Amino acid sequence: GLADRLQNTLQKIRGKGKVTEADVKEMMREVRLALLEADVNFKVVKDFINRVKERAVGQDVMKSLTPGQQVIKVVNEELTALMGGEQSKIAVAKKPPTVVMMVGLQGAGKTTTTGKLANHLRKNHNRKPFLVAADIYRPAAIKQLETLGKQLSLPVFSLGDKVNPVEIVKQGIAKAKEEHCDYVIIDTAGRLHIDEGLMDELKDMKDAANPDEVLLVVDAMTGQDAVNVADSFNKQLDITGVVLTKLDGDTRGGAALSVKAVTNTPIKFAGMGEKLDQLEAFHPERMASRILGMGDVLTLIEKAQANVDEEKAKELQQKMKTMSFTLDDFLDQLRQIRSMGPLEDLLGMIPGANKMKGLKDAKVDEKQLVKIEAVIQSMTMKEREQPAIINASRRKRIANGSGTTVQDVNRLLKQFEDMKKMMKQMMGTGKKKKGGMKFP
Ligand code: GDP
Ligand code: MG
């Protein structure tokens, strides 16, 4: 899948201390293949790659301490932009009711989404929705919407399947006004493929309804096809937004990435399952992160950059290499990490950390950190630089000075020794832990 391919590619440069122009090119080749494989529109891929390349070989990225992560950040930002950047909200008519017309191919999820959207508007926006059953062709389509209405205790308007859909829409909207409902959601018919008859009828319905939103419901599983569908619906009906359904399935993600670019209309909602509460506002940034499979790694990177002085970090790397890392450096590190926020939150942002056994339930004891800080502060500079000189009487003095016990001091010294050993291993072999997040 797209996510896996991108992740493999990004993994290669994630921890890189130096990224050359050749690296970026190589990586872009991989990203390009991954996107095409995920069924993203060819032209969209081409533009995307050019934008990322341009930014990735820029001065800021190459000169930064963590160019690998910076390239990932650029890819993420451009993915987000590709999907519309900001979250796009549903229209609200100046004069109620707001009229929303659902269109799309058969099986895309129009009827289900009509119910879900009504539920969403009532639950999250305190609205009073009214449903109109205007699909007179699909057997039992009216019944299907009525069942959803019953489940939600919401009014569903229908005139059976013998009345012209244009008439149904007119009468439905009038009825909604009578009942002082503020959102009218019209479920329409689809075909297995786009045809003139379907489009003409939808155009007539649109003229009659004068909708504030024409939402195109697109099955995310259909990849490149979804984009062609979106393109022709848009040309005929001037859609105002897209609902991507079945994003809970094993989609290749291509539809999400090209629909906005091709139609120039935002994706407003995402269907995440068959149930009535499984509709979410579409957040381009979250989707980008999901595609990249990075958790909130970018937030983490940003936090790290805001808090860690680059010069200091370089110095630290050097110290770790030469094994001159002292307890004082350790204290410095601790403070920097602590200034980034609660450790538990930080752990949650590290990709893969939530999958790591033990870590998931690990409660990071902030009190323990305060204690460690106190112990180190009670040491002299010489002790911090050469912990070997800390004998029994010094341990006692440090414990007294920091309001801790000799056991606490012992434990810290042991932890520090273990950490140095680990660093030695990491630095010595030059191998990086797979999937490991490297703090700058
Ligand atoms: P319509 O022909 O466009 O009205 O499509 P329907 O609303 O009847 O939906 C077709 C099928 O897709 C139904 O089985 C729905 O339960 C299913 N479906 C709709 N939206 C989603 C979704 O977001 N996720 C999943 N997994 N299934 C969905
Ligand atoms: Mg339907």
Image (cartoon, rainbow, N blue to C red):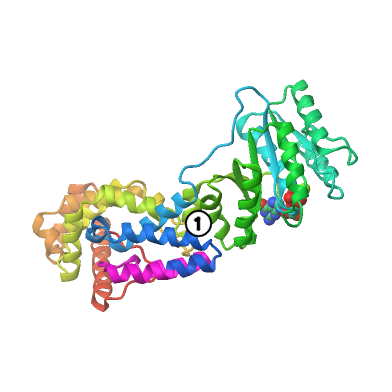
Q: Residue shown at 32%/72% (left/top)?
A: 432
Q: Residue shown at 64%/34% (left/top)?
A: 121
Q: In which quarter of the image is the N terminus?
A: bottom right
Instruction: Please indicate whether residue 87 sits to the left or right of residue 246 in the image.
Output: left
Expressed as whole percent of the image width and height from the top left, the position of residue 53 reads 34, 61
Expressed as whole percent of the image width and height from the top left, the position of residue 215 reads 64, 42
- The residue most toward the left is 382
Q: Residue shown at 40%/52% (left/top)?
A: 77
Expressed as whole percent of the image width and height from the top left, the position of residue 44 reads 48, 58
Residue 232's place in the image compared with 12, above or below, is above
**Magenta span:** 1-30
Say which residue label 1 marks.
290
Residue type at mark 1: give it. Answer: Arg
Q: Is residue 412 magenta?
A: no
Residue 24's place in the image compared with 181, above or below, is below
Expressed as whole percent of the image width and height from the top left, the position of residue 166 reads 80, 35
The majority secondary structure of the magenta stretch comes to helix
- The residue most toward the bottom is 429
How crowded is the residue under tag 1: few (<14 C-alpha within 10 Å), some, or many (20+)? some
Instruction: Please indicate whether residue 26 sits to the left or right of residue 46 in the image.
Output: left
Instruction: Please indicate whether residue 348 sits to the left or right of residue 37 in the image.
Output: left
Q: Does the magenta stretch include residue 6?
A: yes
Judge by depth and name the residue closer to the eye, 29 or 277: 29
Confirm whether residue 322 shows in the render.
yes
Instruction: Please indicate whether residue 180 sits to the left or right of residue 323 in the image.
Output: right
Q: Which image quadrant for residue 168?
A: top right
Confirm whether residue 272 shows in the render.
no
Q: In which quarter of the image is the C terminus?
A: bottom left
Disc 1 is placed on an element classified as: helix
Residue 121's place in the image compared with 50, above or below, is above
